[in-house]
Image (spheres, rainbow, N blue to C red):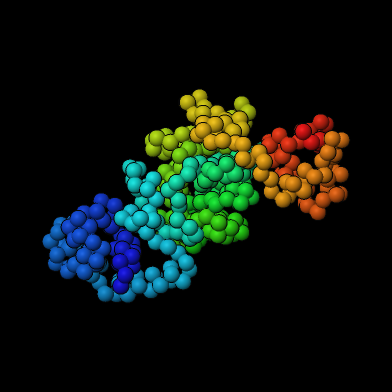
Amino acid sequence: MEELEQAYFIGTRRGIGVKTWQRLMREFGSFEGVYQAAKGDLKKSGIVSEPLAEELTDSLAREQSHRDWETLQKKGIRYCTMFHEEYPERLRSIFDPPKHLFRLGKPVPSKNCSVAIVGARDCTAYGRDMARLFAYRLSMAGIRVISGMARGIDGWAHQGALEAGKDTYAVLGSGVDVCYPSEHRRLYESIAKSGGILSEFVPGTRARPQFFPLRNRIISALSDGLLVVEAKQRSGSLITADLALEQGKDVFVIPGRIGDPLSEGCNRLIRQGAMPVLSPEDILEYYEISTYNIEEIRTPKQQLVLDRIGESPVSLRELDSQLDLSMTEILKQILVLKENNHIREVARDCYIRK
């Protein structure tokens, strides 16, 4: 049996936390040492309880673990522990690092700046557009976008990064083989293909409310900064912001309208010292990342829209009749082109090239 499978068997036993695992590794020297240890030696060490020593040496438990391991391999799920090189370095320094991670897709690169984008599940159209735009622009500039694949802001942030043709990583409050929410199936598959899906929960684990705060600490830990787009006064996004501050991360906030319930959390964060941002360039400037390269990069769809806009005003209705794109797609490209200063709006829904 390979070492990684031995680690999987040990790490998935109830009662094996980070500290217990570290003590076992010091006592027995390696995963194989722990795996091969006799029941009496495990009991004598005083590190584990008698029932846990029984389970660690139980042949039926090992057989079931082997079957589970083979299922993981068939599904393409990778496994690593905090003792392995593929374990993200940024997680090692937090107060309560996950003892192990399951992953679909690529390992999380240790280089390059990363920003987590989080916010309300029941976001507004404005919040959706901002999450998508910020993720797109940051991704184009080389910043990795991380989120939790939840409804609303999380999902749109991932979508923006994917539209930029860049990788993005989702940390789940379920097993990596459980797509939650289920309507994000296509997004889930796209993220796994271009970046990665991560979780500390054993595959097959269903999402539960108590798992999301645990998930949030990983999202913030993997990032250099956290961007909150829309958040109520009491929300998971504010929990993530608190975790980010505890971990010494930068917290950015898109300001909202006074009196809007979805802006109360954001505005209060600003009052408490978070950095308000009015455009993606504010974050890029903060991290001293040049924006010159993203001004010149356009997707084929953006170029298609831009080619139809000249020095004379062109209306959305005209664009809709000329282009083989949906109105939603045209509006999305218009938003990005405006932010990139390629076009400007001269009248309601009428644009000219700058």
- Residue 73, given in percent of the width and then of the height, sits at 43, 69
Compared to 63, does 77 lie above or below?
above
Identify the residue shown where x is 38% and y is 74%: 67
Left or right, 47 with respect to 4, comes to left
Please identify the quadrant where the N terminus is shown: bottom left
Nearer the observer, 185 or 91: 91
Q: Is residue 217 visible?
A: no
- Residue 349, given in percent of the width and then of the height, sits at 81, 37
Q: Is residue 277 visible?
A: yes
Identify the residue shown where x is 48% and y is 51%: 171
Please identify the quadrant where the C terminus is shown: top right
Identify the residue shown where x is 54% and y is 31%: 285
Nearer the observer, 315 or 56: 315
- Residue 75, given in percent of the width and then of the height, sits at 48, 68
Identify the residue shown where x is 42% and y is 59%: 102
- Residue 145, given in percent of the width and then of the height, sits at 53, 45
Left or right, 340 with respect to 349, comes to left
Compared to 72, does 244 lie above or below?
above
The count of marks equals 0
Nearer the observer, 292 or 149: 292
